[in-house]
Image (cartoon, rainbow, N blue to C red):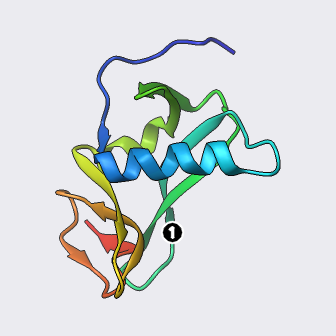
Amino acid sequence: MSKEVTEDVPVRFTEGALKKLHEIQASSDKELAPYLRIGVKGGGCSGLSYLLAFDGKTEKDEQFRIDDIDVIMDKSHVMYVYGMEIHFEEGLNSRGFEFRNPNAKETCGCGESFST
């Protein structure tokens, strides 16, 4: 498997999201997979759900480097998330990663699924 890293990064993280991802990496009591996977999967209220998890790389993946984090994404998922911003919300009423996707035509109330 090649270690090719693409320069054109399809998504971006806010400062809060990067901080939280670095905290997760530093505080994990078990070894995390080497890459952060961003993508989509079928399901959810609106048709597609977001995927954000540490994972291993496959031959279908493109690799990106964002603030010292190795990010992978299935090449076929780029069209669904290109231009997306990932934020981490740490408020009283909501806590977690928030996906701000300019490609989404419709999202569910929880913000974890969308349709194009």
In this rendering, position of residue 75 left or right of residue 34 = left
Residue type beneath disc 1: Gly
Neighbourhood count class around disc 1 (C-alpha, 10 Å): few under 14, some 14–19, many 20 upward: few
10 and 15: which one is in front? Answer: 15
In this rendering, position of residue 80 left or right of residue 23 = left
Q: Which residue is disc 1 drawn over?
A: 42
Q: Is residue 76 above or below residue 46?
A: above
In this rendering, position of residue 17 left or right of residue 12 = right
Identify which residue is drawn at 47% across, 80% down: 44
**Residue 102, visible in the rendered structure:** yes
Specify the quadrant that holds the N terminus: top right
SS of the residue under disc 1:
strand
Identify which residue is drawn at 51% across, 58% down: 51
Position of residue 8 measured from the top left corner of the image (x, y, whole percent): 29, 23
Position of residue 96 measured from the top left corner of the image (x, y, whole percent): 44, 70
Q: Is residue 83 above or below residue 62?
A: below
